[in-house]
Amino acid sequence: MRIFTTVLTLLIAIAFVGSAMAVGTGKTVEFAGGKEGKVIFDGKTHAEKGAKCNDCHPKTFAMKKGTAKIAAPHKAGEFCGTCHDGKKAFAQEGNCVKCHKK
């Protein structure tokens, strides 16, 4: 019985850790954007455009919230610039207000 209780406790703990780290397709994540204004990542919008969670996670973005340290100027091929390159999705350059909201 003690082994069963231990295993059950571990499974519940793993389930809660996973849910604390992930942002579902209907959820949002807010990034501080400095003087340009905050950026709100909308999982639903990206899913509607055909993006899948594993397109960005964990290769481009770690699964744990708060680990992405995105700095300006943004670089092509890094973080959001992996897709927002003007080919796969709208380019970052010249489109600041599409993401940054004051």
Image (tube, rainbow, N blue to C red):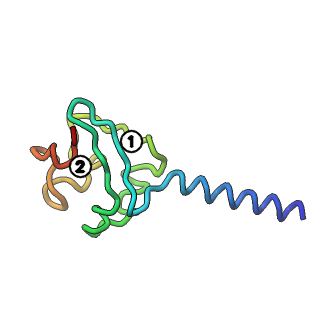
Extreme top residue here?
35
Tell me what residue is drawn at x 47 percent, y 51 percent.
Answer: 63
Q: Is residue 28 left or right of residue 90?
A: right
Say which of 96 and 84 sits in front. Answer: 96
Tell me what residue is drawn at x 67 percent, y 55 percent.
Answer: 13
Extreme left residue here?
94
Q: Are marks 1 and 2 in contact (CB under 8 Å)?
A: no
Distance between the Cα atoms at labels 1 and 2? Answer: 13 Å
Q: Amino acid at mark 1?
A: Ala
**What is the quadrant of residue 24 in the picture?**
bottom left
Tell me the number on the disc at residue 6.
Answer: none
Instruction: Report helix, strand or loop for mark 2.
Output: helix
Q: Quadrant of the C terminus?
A: top left
The residue under label 1 is: 68
Residue 91, image x, y percentages: 14, 51
Say which of 100 and 86 sits in front. Answer: 100
Q: Amino acid at mark 2?
A: Gly
**What is the quadrant of residue 90 in the picture?**
bottom left
Tell me the number on the disc at residue 81.
Answer: 2
Instruction: Report helix, strand or loop for mark 1.
Output: loop
Residue 51, image x, y percentages: 31, 65
Q: Is residue 90 left or right of residue 79?
A: left
Q: Residues within 10 Å of mark 2 (few under 14, many from 20)?
A: some
Q: Residues within 10 Å of mark 1 (few under 14, many from 20)?
A: few
Residue 84, image x, y percentages: 20, 53
